[in-house]
Image: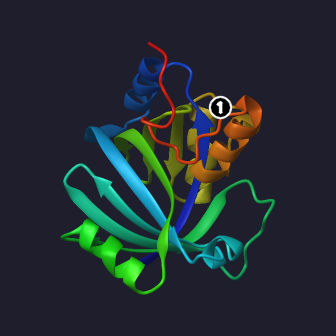
Amino acid sequence: MSADEIEVKFRVADPPALERKLVAAGFRRITPRTFEKNVLFDTPDRRLRAQQSILRVRQYGERWVVTHKCLPQNNDPVARHKHRIETETEVKDGDAMSVIFSQIGYAPAFTYEKWRTEYADASGHCVIDETPIGLFAELEGPREWIDAMAQRLGLDPGELITLSYGRLFEEWRAATGSAATDLTFAAIPQPK
């Protein structure tokens, strides 16, 4: 099923404080903290990346989801919100999908992991993602809802991020000089 995905990210300094704000704003937790592994596939010449598209196999707890994301025809590269056309389907065996993609010329290009907790209200979602490079949250829903909720959560518009986790990882690597090639907990040791 295809749908428009409109979202922003922001860094989270105090997860319990954010969770209290979400509850006060009428959110309910819909998924407890769950491990998520994502593998992006691409051609050897990185054709999908050049088109700003992704082909992803995600394992979220016991669920497997295959997703394709691409830019909409009317994409505005300087927009306040990240906007993608997302087509996804749940599959029974993500490992088998990975083999199929490899057999038709796609190979794993980037892996990223996180622990995700999901919240929702009547109009949108907020997820809290614990990644190897820090804590982030995403607001996903209609543009007007995102703007109103960001304001209600006390976020400054300058705090809102439209970059993907892949791009955030590239920025982190440049800033730290890390040689890690994947955004995984094994590749990026966590402080004790």
**104 relative position to 35: left or right:** right
- Is residue 178 visible in the rendered image? The answer is yes
Q: Residue at x 60, y 73 (%)?
A: 53
State the residue lying farthest toward the right.
78
Residue 86 appears in the picture as rendered = no
In the rendered view, would you say 187 is above or below 76? above
Q: Quadrant of residue 25?
A: top left
Write down the residue under mark 1.
155
Query: Secondary structure beneath disc 1?
Result: loop
Choose top left, top right, bottom left or bottom right for residue 63.
Answer: bottom left
Q: Closest to the observer: 167 or 179?
A: 179
Up-down: is 87 above or below 129?
Answer: below
Q: Residue at x 55, y 27 (%)?
A: 12
- Pinpoint residue 69: horizontal percent, then vertical percent: 53, 72
**Vertical side of 56 occupied by 184: above or below:** above
Q: How is the image coloured?
A: rainbow
In percent of the image, x 75 and y 32: which residue is there? 175
Q: Is residue 157 left or right of residue 148?
A: right
Image quarter hosting the N terminus:
bottom left
For the image, the number of numbered tags is 1
Return the residue nearer the eye: 183 or 11: 183
The type of residue carrying mark 1 is: Leu
Left or right: residue 5 versus residue 179 is left
Q: Is residue 128 above or below residue 59?
A: above
Q: Position of residue 167 (x, y in %)?
A: 67, 51
Percent from the top left, x then y, of residue 131? 48, 36
Pinpoint residue 110: horizontal percent, then vertical percent.
Answer: 52, 57
Q: Quadrant of the C terminus?
A: top left
